[in-house]
Image (cartoon, rainbow, N blue to C red):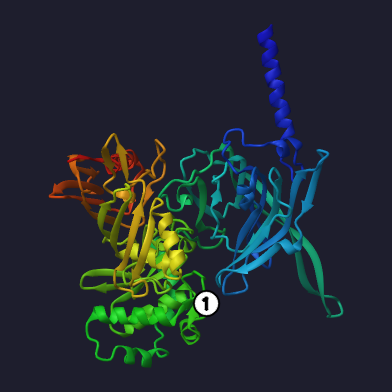
Amino acid sequence: MKSNFLTILAVLCFVNTSISQNYKFGKVSKEELLQKEHPTDPTADAAILYREIHTEFQYTNNDGFYMVTDVFERVKIYNKEGFDWASKEVDLYQSTSSSKDEIIGLKAYTYYLDGNNKIEEVKLKNDGVFEEKTTKYIHKTKFTMPDVREGCVIEYKYSIKSPFISNIDEFRLQETIPVEKIEIRFASPEYFVFKTHQKGWVPYKVESTSRDRTIALANSRSEYDRYGNMTNRGGARDFKFKEDIYTIDLTDVPAMKEESYAGNIDNYSTGLKFELSYVDFPGSSMKTYSTTWEDVSKGIYKVDSFGNELDKDNYFEDDLNSLLNGVSSQEEKVNKIFSFVLNKMTWNRYTGYYTNEGVKEAYKKGSGNVADINLMLIAMLRKANINANPVLVSTKDNGMPLFPTRNGFNYVIAAVELPQGMVLLDATNKEAEVGVLKPSIMNWQGRLILKDGTSSWVPLSPQTHAVKSSMVNVAIKPDMTVTGVAKNRFTGNYALKYRAKYKSLNADATRKALEKDANQAELSEVNFENLNTLGEPVALDYEFETFGAVEDVAGKLYLSPMVFMATKESPFKPETRLYPIDFGYPMKDRYIFNIALPEGYKVESLPENAVYNLGTNMGSYRYLISQAGNNIQLSVEFSINTSYIAAEEYGNLKKFFELLIAKENEKVVLSKA
């Protein structure tokens, strides 16, 4: 009897909970506002309580078919770190013609409990909504919710009217915060046939049904009356068709967790993409939309603000002739042209593979978007008889180009064929070198387009290692402090990283920033070289003093031979991992330590030498230590030979780092001589 009572009570509790969860706009409950943390993810800064996205097609005589997407979202903010979720950006597309997306019916409120436990609401006003032009083809509508505070709930709804029926944004089913409930509905006329592409690791099912639908159309026709005058007569007719409906209903979607070296984790989040395959209207020939990457590349190349811009060269001809006077080698021509464009042009922070100003106008102004600058670079290289071609790229923020659509790319760089192989160039980055790209655009592969419009994939990660070389001389003082001199050299993406971080800092800020990364060692006589000289390794020399590298235990000295440079903590802590590891570029770190023995001490024991290998040539670690007279010599080399490592290799990578960290933190034992 007691068991039956408990069962009934549990059912009633479930019913009450279900009733209290009202997903209608404006029906935020006290229970939602009182919630202090997410029930299944207490670490969450915010949670999406409800997301509803409904897309359907409407029709008018003037516009034909167009899409209307209704969005409604309710979000719980738990703490200040969750305030970012109170701001929203909506991308709106527009073509070179008058066709464009429109956002309509935006309504938004912030809800909180006042001192009397009463629900208060604050409406989003017009001054909280902003328009921003991102590129020639994408505008953003941004809004920030009013009176956001810890514990509040926000909700907003809006509709997007779009004529671009072949350009459908991905339906996002997962975020970096929990999603409690999500409903997706996509309804399209039978004449439009779509492919669906699912991604991510959260399983879900797409239900499909169909129904008959009727749209009432206003109709106007011209007639002559009996006196010969033209009159307009109103009327109406019904437009009937079958509608295909796709729905997704998901609950309790876990958050995507940030991981070390994951790149953009949106690449692996759960989502659904609709791709228009073909349109087949009765009485008309079938029109195919489903494309390959080859079709996408050719389509982009044919647009005037891409392909035609590459053919223009009269605006720079005199400057180019002067620049290359007496230069014969291809490598020197590339270096001179790249350096010229770097110095002349300033990137206006707009991305895109179509020009905005146009190369000629951008050249005159000395500034432009990514396409203005890099298509100009390609045109100059071609004029100098260098085999140069554009490479379409998707930045890491834009995600990996998984499906063949034009918005799979948002950037363009240059590729040059030299005797030693292909070299990639990006003249928007003032710290760049020939063949070195910034991490934000080293995103898997780019699409190389040749002059005839054919295209192919090329890797964006460099084939050569970024190298750090350190020579360190170490001395142990009688008070057990350790002093020394370090001479460091950085190449490739390491050099780019140091230029970007330190080029604009003064001496004091530079020293403090270096000390922050030096495990509290005190640095002095800090000196950089070649921060402003591209093509040369960045050099960094300094003197140091550290107090934690030696311990005196019962008259014996325990020394950390790598002093403050030993790796203390692994970036790979979770036991399992769902995403691949993205190091960005191959890297190699080399250290040579020369440690002078303090007077009156001898070596009692040294760590054992060790060599560890990661997979089949994915990475390696070598630790070689020996005594030579009154000195200890240590050579350490760490290398990662590939930019990407599959998630299946995570266990081996985790163990690899655990072994090298343990080795680097072993002690040299010195005893009295």
**Three-letter code, disc 1:** Asn
Q: Secondary structure at mark 1?
A: loop
Name above or below for residue 138 compared with residue 653.
below
Where residue 442 appears, x then y in whole percent? 38, 61
Q: Which image quadrant is residue 248 in?
A: top right
Where residue 381 appears, x then y in whole percent? 33, 81
Residue 232 seen by the camera:
yes
| Of the pair 276 and 422, the residue shown nearer to us | 422
Q: Is residue 671 left or right of residue 124?
A: left
Which residue does the image show at 81% across and 72% down from the upper left? 232
- Count neighbours of disc 1 (C-alpha within 10 A) and say few if under 14, some if 14 to 19, many if 20 or more: many
Where residue 302 appears, x then y in whole percent? 44, 74
Residue 452 seen by the camera:
no
Where residue 183 appears, x then y in whole percent? 62, 43
Q: Quadrant of the N terminus?
A: top right
| Of the pair 323 and 3, the residue shown nearer to us | 323
The residue sitting at the left extreme is 629
The residue under label 1 is 356
Q: Is residue 288 left or right of residue 44?
A: left
Name above or below for residue 274 compared with residue 601.
below
Q: Which image quadrant is residue 512 in?
A: bottom left
